Amino acid sequence: MRNSWPASISDKPTMLYEKSLRSGQNIDFDGNVVILGDVNPGAEVVATGHILVMGSLRGLVHAGAAGEEGATVTALHFAPTQLRIASHITRPPEDGAPVDDKPAETARIKDDEVVIEKYQAPR
């Protein structure tokens, strides 16, 4: 029997990319994207679902590209050149702290704004 309600983001297909993205390289995927490597400046990742970077995020990312405001972007080292979630576009503040000294962070939409916070594992 098939469910009649829409699938959640977590039910979307997930792409696993097992390399770093260099400048000029792009990923555009209808679902979630997990990258085992870095996203370097000049690289771009667009996904209709969540984006997870198991490395440094220093390029452009767009999660929830089809308008899904529940999408998130998570990275071990979070310093994107541009961050988009659904129709929201932002850049993280330049706080001067070295990227390697920060904990993993997640960006999400809260109260119609993009917020970046320390990563909290689901319970």
Image (cartoon, rainbow, N blue to C red):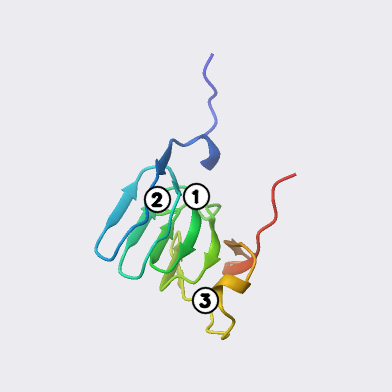
- From the image, tell me which residue sits under label 3: 92
> x%, y% of residue 96?
56, 86
Q: Relative to 101, say whether 73 is above or below.
A: above
Q: Are marks 2 and 1 in contact (CB under 8 Å)?
A: yes
The amino acid marked with disc number 2 is Ala
Indicate the secondary structure of the residue bearing disc 3.
loop
The amino acid marked with disc number 1 is His
Question: How many residues crowd mark 3 within 10 Å: few (<14), some (14–19), many (20+)?
Answer: some
User: Residue drawn 49% across and 58% down?
Assistant: 55
- From the image, tell me which residue sits under label 1: 50
Question: How many residues crowd mark 2 within 10 Å: few (<14), some (14–19), many (20+)?
Answer: many
The amino acid marked with disc number 3 is Pro
User: Image check: 109 left or right of 85?
Assistant: right
State the CA–CA distance, disc 2 to disc 1.
Answer: 7 Å
- From the image, tell me which residue sits under label 2: 47
Image quarter of the C terminus: top right
Counting residues from the start of the chain, the first of labels 1 and 3 encountered is 1
Q: Residue furthest top?
A: 1
> x%, y% of residue 6?
51, 34
Residue 71 visible in the picture: yes
Indicate the secondary structure of the residue bearing disc 1.
loop
Counting residues from the start of the chain, the first of labels 2 and 3 encountered is 2
Residue 8 visible in the picture: no
State the CA–CA distance, disc 2 to disc 3.
Answer: 19 Å
User: Residue drawn 61% across and 62% down?
Assistant: 104
> x%, y% of residue 44?
33, 61
User: Residue drawn 55% across and 74% down?
Assistant: 99
Image quarter of the N terminus: top right
Q: Residue furthest left?
A: 24
